[in-house]
Image (tube, rainbow, N blue to C red):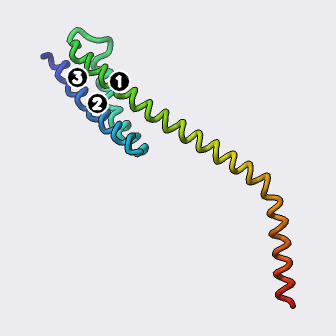
Amino acid sequence: MNSNETVAARLLASIEEFVGQEILALRAGDYPGAMRIQERAAPVISRLCHLGAGRPAWWTAALGRRLDAVLARRRQSRALVAAHRKDLSAERDRLAEARRRLWTVAPAYAGCRAASRQSSRLNAAV
């Protein structure tokens, strides 16, 4: 095994560990934690990209399969994030609609509040 191949295998092992941690964090709903994991993984990924640029002669089929497996797990992570984003967007839309309805009804209640203030002042004076 060539030294570059050994380094690439170790880098891939680290990336596999990061991807596993990221998926666990996403499934637990720890999105800030997943982001921190991605930030920690970025230099390792960058190093592997630099080392394996252009698929050099020492790049083996086994390394390629491991990289493909990592990419498949990253697609799972992206799908989890996309589903969460969709849920958040639906919740934001629901809240915007509730706010809109509140603003249409609020003027009617504002008049009631002003009337209740006046009556309480009158009762206090009597």
Q: CA distance from mark 3 to mark 1?
A: 18 Å
Tag 2 secondary structure? helix
Q: Give coordinates of residue 23: x percent, y percent.
A: 35, 36
Q: Nearer the viewer, mark 2 or mark 1?
A: 1
Q: Quadrant of the N terminus?
A: top left
Residue type for callout 3: Ala
Q: Nearer the viewer, residue 84 or 51?
A: 84
Q: Quadrant of residue 110?
A: bottom right
Residue topped by disc 2:
15
Q: Nearer the viewer, mark 3 or mark 1?
A: 1
Q: Is residue 97 above or below residue 86?
A: below
- Residue 72 shows which numbered tag? 1
Q: Quadrant of residue 92?
A: top right
Residue topped by disc 3:
8
Q: Is residue 27 above or below residue 125?
A: above
Residue type for callout 1: Ala
Marks 3 and 2, the one that precedes in the sequence: 3
Determine whether, in the image, residue 23 is placed left or right of residue 98. Answer: left
Determine whether, in the image, residue 34 is placed left or right of residue 116. Answer: left
Q: Nearer the viewer, residue 54 or 122?
A: 122
Determine whether, in the image, residue 1 is placed left or right of residue 27. Answer: left
Q: CA distance from mark 3 to mark 2?
A: 10 Å
Whether label 2 touches label 1, CB < 8 Å? no
Q: Give coordinates of residue 6: x percent, y percent.
A: 17, 22
Tag 1 secondary structure? helix
Q: Is residue 46 above or below residue 101?
A: above
Q: Give coordinates of residue 103: x percent, y percent.
A: 76, 53
